[in-house]
Amino acid sequence: GAGVSQSPSNKVTEKGKDVELRCDPISGHTALYWYRQSLGQGLEFLIYFQGNSAPDKSGLPSDRFSAERTGGSVSTLTIQRTQQEDSAVYLCASSLAPWRAVYEQYFGPGTRLTVT
Amino acid sequence: SQQGEEDPQALSIQEGENATMNCSYKTSINNLQWYRQNSGRGLVHLILIRSNEREKHSGRLRVTLDTSKKSSSLLITASRAADTASYFCLIQGAQKLVFGQGTRLTINP
């Protein structure tokens, strides 16, 4: 079946603008994760959804970052008033069940965000 | 930093040789997973080892876990050019998901 998809694949935006990144998980996967990968910080966990709720938001770097998930499927990560340090590849992953239940994660190809 | 530690940061070996990379962590874990990343984009799951396991094999991959030392190692045997990639451990604790900093593996023909 189809894997995790993300859109757009690349996004260039001006500093101060808002951006929305989209993730379509594998059908039937109840858990969804957002990560950020940048040169200086490596791979960072941002947020995790179980169904439509996010029990762990501790990884969001600031209150400019928010995420939602509707219908237990598609998720959007929104960054308001983007800053240059937000430039990174944003990766989404999904898994069959909550990470406490020990399942592998399937990653999307990522969205490369560049803030100019 | 919320990241686990991996070493070496970079490893360059000849095709056919074995490659070993290590991951250390600080918290108690539920499981530890290894992923491969090509070209700085999506990650591919390689192998998962649970906290009550000590060793697992999958093809040319062998993973060990030492919970007393809070460390894991990934061994790739008989390396191939296609194994050139970055390798990350993902540490799943009770409260946290943490990636290691990654090992960049280069296989020379």
Image (cartoon, coloured by chain):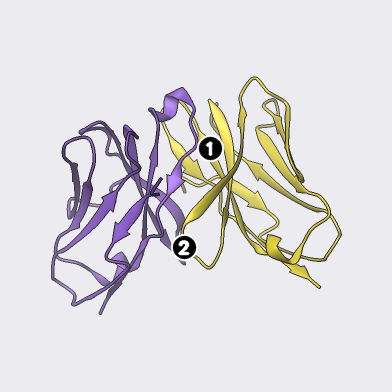
Chain colours: A purple, B yellow
Q: Which amino acid lies under the numbered mark 1 shown in the image of this protein?
A: Ile
Image coordinates for residue A47, horizontal then vertical, percent: 31, 42
Instruction: Kindly give the residue lying farthest to the bottom in the view shown.
Output: A116
Image coordinates for residue A102, horizontal then vertical, percent: 49, 27
Q: Quadrant of residue B108?
A: bottom right
Identify the element where label 2 is drawn.
loop
Q: On the image, numbered disc 2 is attached to which residue?
A: B41
Which residue is at a point 22% across and 45% down the rendered structure image?
A: A74
Say above or below: A84 vs A69: below
Alpha carbons under labels 2 and 1: distance apart: 20 Å
Which residue is at a point 53% across and 25% down the rendered structure image?
A: B30
Q: In what quadrant of the picture does the C terminus of chain A appear?
A: bottom left
Mark linked to residue B91: 1
**In the displayed structure image, the side of residue A16 where residue B11 appears, left or right:** right
Q: Which amino acid lies under the numbered mark 2 shown in the image of this protein?
A: Arg
Nearer to the camera, A20 or B95? A20
Nearer to the camera, B56 or A45? B56
Nearer to the camera, B64 or A27? A27
Instruction: Kindly give the residue lying farthest to the top in the view shown.
Output: B52
Please, which chain is the residue tagged with disc 2 on? Answer: B
Dot 1: few (<14), some (14–19), or many (≥20) neighbours within 10 Å? many
Say above or below: A102 vs B108: above
Badge 2 or badge 1: first in the primary sequence: 2
